[in-house]
Image (tube, rainbow, N blue to C red):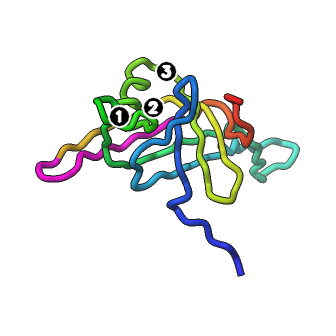
Amino acid sequence: MPTYISGDDSILSIHDGTAYRPVACLTSNSLQSTLEVKETINKCVPGAVQKTVGAMSYSISVDGEYVDTTSAGGDTALASHDFLFQKQSSGEYVTWKLTNGTVASQYGTALITDLSKEAPAGENMTFSATLDGSGLIVEVDPEA
C-alpha cells in the first residue's frame, strides 16, 4: 500500500540572504513544470512529425494568509506578503526551497511576477503570488 504525503508537508520557503524563511501562512501552493516540444517535418522521414526536446520552464503559485512579520511581536522568522513585495519591487531573484514531507526537497531561483493582497472587511487579509522559475529545479541546496 502506498504512503501518501499530506499537502500540509509541502512548505515553500524563500532565502533571505541568511536562512530560508517559510512563506506564511500558506493555504495552498503548487508547482507547475512544462517541457517545450519542438516539432519538425523533414525529407528524411516524409510525412512524419519528428519531436525534439526544447526548454523546460516552471512556476510556483501560492495562496496564504497575511501575517505580521515586521512590528514588535511580529514573527520575523516567516516571510509574508510584505517580504515578497520587497523582493518583487526590487526585481530581485529569490532562491526558493520546497519541502515535500519524506520526498527530497527541491530548490530553484525565480522572480516574483504576480503578487496580490486582499483585505475583506471582517476577515483576515490574504495574498496570492506567482514565482516564475529561472534555471533548473534541483535537489541540492544552492545556498549551502
Would you identify the image quadrant in which residue 53 lies?
Answer: top right
The numbered dot on residue 112 is: 2
Instruction: Locate the C terminus and report the quarter of the image it occupies.
Output: top right
Residue at 73 percent across and 43 percent down: it is: 139
Q: Is residue 102 above or below residue 21?
A: below
Q: Which mark is residue 69?
A: 1
Q: Nearer the viewer, mark 1 or mark 2?
A: 1
Q: Is residue 77 left or right of residue 138?
A: left
Please state which of residues 110 and 58 is positioned toward the viewer in this rendering. Answer: 110
Q: Nearer the viewer, residue 19 or 120?
A: 19
Q: Which label sits on residue 92?
A: 3
Please name the amino acid that badge 1 sits on. Answer: Thr
- Tell me if residue 122 is in the magenta stretch: yes
* Sequence-first tag of 2 and 3: 3
Give the CA distance from mark 2 to mark 3.
8 Å
Tell me the residue at 66%/31% (across/down).
135
Q: Which residues are magenta?
A: 120-132
Q: Say which quadrant the N terminus sits in.
A: bottom right
**Residue 10 position within the rendered picture, expressed as x and y whole percent measured from the top left:** 55, 54
Give x and y (percent) for residue 27: 39, 55
Asked which secondary structure carries label 2, the reply is strand
Q: Is residue 47 left or right of residue 37?
A: right
Classed neighbour count for the residue bearing mark 2: other residues with Cα under 10 Å, few (<14), some (14–19), many (≥20): many
Please give the name of the residue rendered at 18% of the width and 53% of the height, measured from the top-left corner: 123
Q: Is residue 40 left or right of residue 94?
A: right
**Secondary structure beneath label 1:** loop
| Disc 1 crowd, CA 10 A, few/some/many (<14, 14-19, 20+) | some
